[in-house]
Image (tube, grey):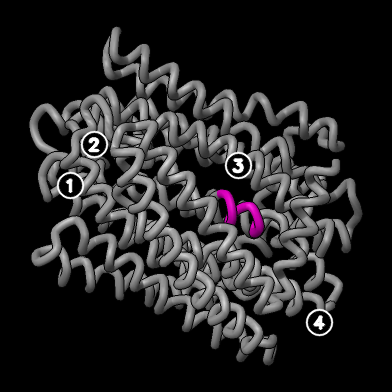
Amino acid sequence: MSRTAKNAVIIMVATLLSRVLGFLRETILANFYGTSMVADVFVLTLNIPGLIISIVGSVIYMMYIPMYYDTRERLGEEESLKFTNNILNILSVFSIIVSILGIIFADEIIKIFAIGFTGEKFALAVKFLRIMMFGVLFLSLNKIQSSFLQVKDSYLPASIVGVVYNLIIIVAIFISVKYGSYYLAIGALVGLFVQVIILLPCMYKRGYKYSFYMNIKDESIIKMIKLSIPMMMGVAMSQLNVYVDKALASTLGDGKLSALNYASRLNDFVVAIFVTSLITVIYPKLSQFVNEKDITNFKKIMVKSSNCIILVVVPIVFGAILLAEPIVRVLLERGSFSHESTLMTSNALRLYAIGIIGYAVKEILSRGFYSLGDTKTPMINSSISVIINIILDLLFIKPFSYMGLAMATSISYMVTVVLMFFSLRKKVGSFNGRAVAKVLIKSTIASIAMSLVVLLTYDGLVSILGLSFIGECASLGGAILLGVIVYAVFIKLFKVEEMKILEGSIKNFFSR
């Protein structure tokens, strides 16, 4: 676990840099466009290529890693490289077809994804989408590139390219203000293309050689397709979730969709740094253990990973609920992003934050099922989650407006993780779930103590330093720093074993 933890910390640092730039990007966008029509259109169309390809692309990405190990074990390194090129070429052809269809039917796609967009807003969204659609190809290639580098134990390049992507969009925002909003869409497309170009030499350095081999009847491809069908259904259901949320938000008037997006971005910051970073490292390990029929180590890494995630995420959830408004105000409130925008975004952030724990553990459990070759169970659970989310969306949207959509998302995550936990236990037997529950209880108690200290410290510092930008930054920083210290002290007193893993990984990283 030590090497895995080291790699996770390296990815966290790289991802942190990328996400900081991502936040800078969102701050600059908020400064110039606030929660305006252009912001709503850009937010929506920026995500559509990813939503379209994720149903196929994400499935292939998740199945590629265990299938690569399986092919290498059965047929050798040369055949696993041949399998990689086969996947790359098939996905490229599929993506180009999807991109062309997306450009042709852009009007219909916007009508589906944004039922509340009309007039000038609708026309602008169609033009943005037609520019961004070829991003489907670049997203697909990036998925396979990242997966190949992961199986070669190279995690840093795929984490770093996000920095370049965000820098390009930041430049595009400044250009768009002077020369026209269309440059936002052009910048997003260029950013996706540059990520692919950067990763190519990294792949060749790790032994990759391109060849135009494409055979849909290949044994490994057929096996992947069979395993992928239930997973595709599960991912499709998850994307339906996103679609329903955005479609309903688009009916609430200008600003609501943007506010939910800004809150979701803040939420994603935590998920990407701590959750995705760990999952990126453990998924190849889980697949390797299953391939070697080492279920004992499979169970151990599942428990350790879940506990590490809980230790980090639980205090962040408490902190986000307490400090949502000042965090949003410091990060986003300037220019066109008004105090009203801050209130909307911070309300959504509090409700999204509640679901982070459920989402984080759910993602780890899902990878466990995929490693075991079980794609049906996650699909069933995803379907249940979507049904719960849609029902709650419809129940909550009228009394709670946009906040009801965020609340529904969090509740659906919490229900799903409980269902998946019992499903995995049924499949592999007991994997020390009590240890996970104990860490969750200890982390919650420590977080409550931390929250009291954070609240008192923040209020005290604000009363002294005031609510100027510098004063509030200092107050937030002081409260968070003291909160981290208090939380760490409590976790040490509770003798949580995973704390040693986190400490060791951080020390090793800084000693490199």
Question: In the rendered structure, which disc, 1 or 3, sits on the residue that comes first in sequence?
Answer: 3
Give coordinates of residue 176: x percent, y percent: 32, 15
Which residue does the numbered mark 2 point to in the structure image?
A: 40
Badge 1 marks a residue whose secondary structure is: loop
Residue that carries the numbered disc 4 in the rendered image = 296
* Residue numbers of the magenta segment: 273-279
Distance of label 1 from label 4 (alpha carbons): 48 Å
Give the vertical position of 369 relative to 475 (above or below): below
Q: Position of residue 254 (x, y in %)?
A: 13, 39
Mark 1 vs 2: CB contact within 8 A: yes
Query: In this picture, is 49 found above or below 34?
Result: below
Q: Earlier in the sequence, mark 1 or mark 4?
A: 1
Quarter holding residue 71 = bottom right
Horizontal relation, residue 55 to residue 372: left or right: left
- Which residue bears the numbered disc 3? 15
Could you tell me which residue is drawn at 81 percent across and 71 percent down?
289
Does the segment drawn in magenta span residue 309?
no
| Neighbour tally class for label 3: few under 14, some 14-19, many 20 plus, Cα within 10 Å | many
SS state under label 2: helix
Q: Which residue does the image show at 79% across and 46% down from the upper left?
A: 509
Closer to the observer: label 1 or label 3? 3
Query: What amino acid is found at the position of numbered circle 3 in the picture?
Result: Thr
Q: Residue 203, how many percent across, how many down? A: 77, 34
Q: Are marks 1 and 3 in contact (CB under 8 Å)?
A: no
Q: Is residue 276 magenta?
A: yes
- How many residues crowd mark 1 within 10 Å: few (<14), some (14–19), many (20+)? many
Separation of marks 2 and 3 at Cα, in angstroms: 26 Å
Q: Residues within 10 Å of mark 2 (few under 14, many from 20)?
A: many
Specify the amino acid type for callout 4: Thr
